[in-house]
Structures are given as C-alpha cells and as structure tokens.
Image: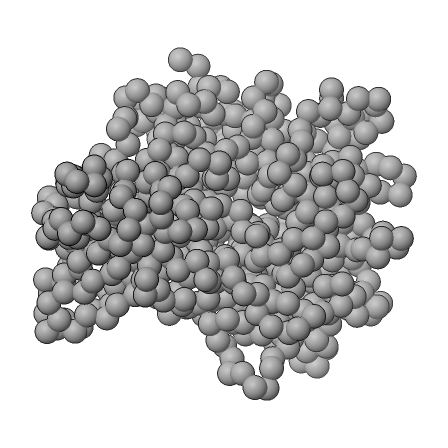
Amino acid sequence: MSCTNSVASEDFADFIAPYFTTPEEFIRSQGTDCIDFVNSTLAVVYVPLSTVTPSTYTSYTYSAVPKLYSLLDVTSMDAAGITPAGELPVLNNQGAGVIVGFVDTGINYTDSLFRNVDGSTRIIGIWDQTNNSDNSNNIENETAKPFSAFSALYGTQYTAEEINLALNSDNPASIVPTRDENGHGTFLASIAAGNRDERAGFSGAAPQASIAMVKLKPAKQYLRDFYLIQDGAEAYQENDIMMGVSYLYFLARKYSMPLVVCIPLGTNMGSHMGMSRLGQYLNQVSLSNGSAVITAAGNETGARHHFRAVMDADTDEVTAELRVGEREAGFSMELWAENMGAYTVGFISPTGEVAREISVPLRGENTVSFLLEQTQITVYTQIADVSSGSQFIFMRFENPMSGIWRILIRNSLDIRETFHIWLPVRGFISDETYFLRPDPDTTITDPGNARYPITVTAYDHTKNSIYIHASRGYSLSGRIKPDLAAPGVNILGASVSGRRLTRMSGTSVSAAHLAGAAAILLNWGVLNANYPYLNTPVLKSIFVRGAQRNPALTYPNREFGYGTLNLYEAFLHLRNL
C-alpha cells in the first residue's frame, strides 16, 4: 500500500514516536517508510489500521496514541494596549516582517483583510491537510534530510505565488482549492493580523504581518470511536497539530523571519502538567530565538468536567458522583494522581449494581459489564506515565445508562495524596454529563499547561471581568497558568458566512490578540535589533511586566494569571529598564 496520500485515510492508524537515531536508521528500525518527521526527536509512524485494531493502551503507550483536541471558542485592541502602542513611532511597525502562523480550520484567502493595497496576498503559505489531490509539492527534500525543508505524506502546500495567481484569476478555487468551511481560522487570523478597515471600524493587532495557515484535517474515525467522541464534534489529532507547527517553523526558517505560532485548541486528555508530546514540542519551539508560541487556556469553567479529592492516610475510599445525560452514547475520562498514589477504581450504577476495586494487570485493562444497564466500562491503568511519572487510570464508558454513577476511588498507599478526574472538553460529550461536586480549578486545557508557551485566558474588556467560561489554573504541577488575560468576549472579526464581520467569544480569541502583540514586539526587538535575542520566555517576561493589575486582586491568580495584556505599558517598562 502506497504511503503518499493514503496515510490521511481511514486505512492507517497514527502513532507519535520519539527516536534517538538518524532518520534513516529510524526508518529501517520501523520497517516502513510511512513516517513523517516532526523534528529531530519526534516522528509520526503510520501503520495499516487492520494490523492494530482494536486500539488500546495495552499494546501502545499512552503518549503514542494521539490525543484529540477541540477549538476553544464558544473595540478590543484599545483594551490590550495595542492601539496606543501603535501611536509610538518606535512601535508603529504593525508586525511587518514577522510571520503570524495558525494551526486551525483554514483561511478565506480571498478576503480583503488579508491582502495588500495592490490586491496581492499577505499570506506567505497555506498547508491544507485535507486536500490530498496532489501533494507532490510537499516533498521538497530527500528522506535523509527531513529538516532542510518541510516534508509531509499528506495534504497540499500553497505558496504566496500560487495564491496571487488564484487571486488574479476568474476562478480562484480552481488554482488554490482550499476553503475555511468553519470560519474559526479566518476569524482568528483577522484578529491577530487583519488589515485596518476604517469604514467597518476594524483592525487586526498586527496588520502588516505576514500570515501562514495550517488547515487541520478532521480526526480519524478510529480515534473518535476509541475516545467515544460524540457525533458532530470538531476534533483534531495531536500529531496533525504537531506537523502543522513543524510547517510553520519551516516557513520561518525558509524566509528568515521571526515567527508567532497561535494554538487555539485544547483537550482535557493528559496529566495537565504540560508534558504531552505536543506540549514538549511546543516547549522546544518556544526556546528558539525569534519564536513566540501562544496557547489558549480553554473554556472549561462551568462545564463541571473536573473532580478533585484529597485522600488522607486513614481514608478508605472517596466517591465521585457523575451525572450521565439522557442521550450520552459513550465517553471516556481520566484519573491522574498528583504525586505518588496507587489507585484503584470501582463503580456503582444508577440501579445500584456494584463493581468494587476492579482488578487490572500491570499495564493492562479489564472490562466490566452491568447487566441491567447494558453498560460496559473498560478500565486501563498505568503505574507511572512516561512523561509525568504519575499514575493514571483511563475509563471508557460504552452505552452508559443515564442517571447518577458513583466512582469509588481507593489508594493502597498509606500517604496523604490528591487525585484528579477530568471528563472530555466541551463539545466532546453532552452538556448533561458532569460531576455533581466539581472543582473549577486546574481546568487549563492541554497544551496550555506547557512550561514555556504563553497561555492566554479571556476577559471582558468592557467590564474588566473574567470570561465566564475561561478555564482556571494552575497546572497540576503548580505552574502559574494562565500567564495573561486578553480581550475575548464578544469580539468582532472576519466572517465566512457572507457577512463582512461577526462576533466570537473564547480563549482562542484572546490568544489571537496576544499573537498580534507578540508580532509587534518581535519586529521591534529582532528585526530592528533593539532586543535581538527574543524568544517566548523573554516575551512572556516583557508582557508580564507591562500587564495591568487590579489593586483589589492578588497576582498571580488562577483566573487572570499575572494580569491583563497591555502592550503599551510593556514597552514603557522596557524603556525604563
């Protein structure tokens, strides 16, 4: 079976694999050339699905199976200090010479908000992962040199030259057949880097920046089935996001330009310590000079998807009560130890049937069936996750009966310990499935808990109040997250529905604001040699110093992080150093 194009089909399963050899040696060790290289330490291996089903954690490590991510959205520039900053001659660069890149749903490249005065495009490149009609222009290098150019076995790249050719034709889609059916990517690109439109009273944060877009392909059905994602939910794979970032990083090197990467996606899968494969990769990119990685915090407050409990040494058992909605076909959830617990789980069904302390072999799984409910629960446990070192338990509910389920948690170690359980993010399950005693804290979605990226939450700039659904910190390891808040409530941006502009709320919108602000600082610092060694941690430090803080609150805090974005004040602080 040919690898090219086919790897994007339902015939292949995807696995994220670390490697410590040369690419050639890794290919030989895997016995297949169906491999994409993310960077010099991570690869994606494509395996015929027929040889790996059913997909479980007993055969593959937890970090190898791609997690699924959701979009984080459910006169803002003044509040963020971006308009006042633009009035300073030294910062009136509007992001020129910097790439603002998105891993999202695509972009409406014909929109005038993304075109120069002469009608040419400001988009430096698009990688459409969904278009596999001709990906010959993806293979720009030999396998032996996978980092000298971008290489992928699926999707199609479009250059600025091709986009301009399309814009000058009577039928642009015949030349560059990529569209943003969802509108999310187009909206965020306009917030971060859209042109100024005086008549509409609109401007992006960095209207002279170059734009790059990755249009993610939808998650494969076998993974949706494994995680029991509800029908109709937008879901994207971890490995596709990683490959998308790799593409953006390639463009920055190709054109020798600073790069801002905006990740408007999140998941509740994982330890919430920022140690997923995606989180670790974003840490690496964040440390590169001239790079800024911006992640959205998530919109999980009020969803009641997080349960937390402290077990003292003399506590025998803790019960987590879970309400399952009427039309819930299935779902999964994860229990994570905060430190060194040794947990087991049991269940009491809505009719009172009991399954206590389900026995699970080392790195194995066990399935229990409930007769009256016709429900199956599969439990997988791992003593120590390879990334975080924490024990986790993966629970998969098939055909769950509606009503109140009780999860019985025991710890066999005589120590004081804390554990957490997370349900999937909004949209992946019914709104009617939730914990009866939820904890609103520690709800930042992955990769927002990663150490070096700047994690942005949303606030209402007209009321100076936190967005009602914005996820709250900190990370499970106690890291301060979110880092900053930016406008993210009822924000105006580009539409693909026929209307010129529309409004959107959510932390992904906030991330777009900060992405534009980062582009302005990268131009000032790197391109104009005012601060040539700027990377994400340095940018974070600058933004934190300029953040606005309410005297009535203590900072940092779980809602606002270190305060609200103010680019103008950040620059004034630099001037006074």
Q: Position of residue 326 (x, y in %)?
A: 35, 45
Q: Residue at x 82, y 70 (%)?
A: 88
- Which of 445/97 is in front? 445
- Which of 29/87 is in front? 87
Q: Residue at x 47, y 25 (%)?
A: 8
| 128 over 453 or under it: above or below | above
Q: Residue at x 54, y 39 (%)?
A: 244
Q: Position of residue 484 (x, y in %)?
A: 56, 68
Q: Quadrant of residue 114?
A: top right
Q: Image check: 373 left or right of 495?
A: left
Q: Image check: 422 left or right of 417?
A: right
Q: Image check: 413 left or right of 124?
A: left
- Which of 123/370 is in front? 370
Residue 344 visible in image: yes
Quarter of the image that includes the N terminus: top left
Please say which color scheme the image uses: one colour
Q: Image check: 374 left or right of 95?
A: left
Q: Quadrant of residue 228?
A: top left
Residue 287 visible in image: no
Q: Position of residue 21 (x, y in %)?
A: 35, 36
